[in-house]
Image: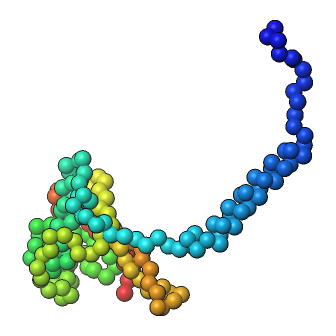
Amino acid sequence: MSGRSVGPRVRPPLSLHLETAANKSLSVLCLAVILVLSPASHAQVAVQAAPNQEPLLASPDARLAANKRLVYDFWREVLEGGHMELAPKYMTESYIQHNPNVPTGRAAFVEFFTKISKPKAIEPRVKAPLVAIVAEGDLVVLSFVREEKDPKDATRKYTTTWFDMFRVENGKIAEHWDIDLKE
């Protein structure tokens, strides 16, 4: 034998257990009240654009990096720059469009955007407030900051995120999705 007494285990009194449980409950309640009453717990964190777009184009996978660059340059040159003559460089002829306001097909895309966009200088980076570029398989997603009027207070604005997703096929954009609603 080791010299320890072998006897019944001594338990703290029940009142000590109740006091400890009450303290824990009070602590949790206080934390909950602080979180609920704290303005920060209700405030939206504003969406922020990436300060440097170049790292967004990087990928350890060369094919994903190429797909990101393709979509990025298409956005800069064709969509923002209005250079519809460059559409064949970036888009398949059978381009599929899921935006309910833009027709499908490369020719229909060019016709649609020629009416609303005139060619201008092509910028070295995307002008829209770009948050991220994500590529997986044959898909590339661009996410942007979008500022909107607060429906509860017309004097205030808030930010949210806009997404455009592209499918790349044989080095060209073959399909597009976004969150636009029918106008």
Q: How many marks?
A: 0
Q: Quadrant of the N terminus?
A: top right
**Residue 100 in view (yes/no):** yes
**Nearest the eye: 167 or 8:** 8
Residue extending farthest front? 3
Location of the C terminus (image quadrant): bottom left
Which residue shows up at 22% across the image and 71% down it? 126
* Residue in the image at 83% along x and 16% along y: 4
Residue 169 visible in the shown view = no
Tell me where residue 146 sits by quadrant.
bottom left
* 136 over 50 or under it: above or below: above
Q: Is residue 163 above or below residue 68?
A: below
Q: Residue furthest left?
A: 85
Rendering colour mode: rainbow
Nearer to us in this view, 20 or 127: 20
Residue 66 against residue 106 in the figure, above or below: above
Q: Is residue 156 above or below residue 79?
A: below
Q: Position of residue 80 (x, y in %)?
A: 20, 77
In the picture, measured across the screen, residue 41 lies left or right of residue 66, that is right
113 vs 11, left or right, is left
Q: Position of residue 31 (x, y in %)?
A: 68, 61
Quarter assignment of residue 124: bottom left
Q: Quadrant of residue 54?
A: bottom left
**Residue at 14% across / 86% down in the picture?**
118
171 relative position to 45: left or right: left
17 vs 177, nearest the viewer = 17
User: For this view, does 136 lie left or right of residue 66?
Assistant: right
Residue 134 location, x and y as percent? 31, 59
- Residue at the top extreme of this rendering: 1
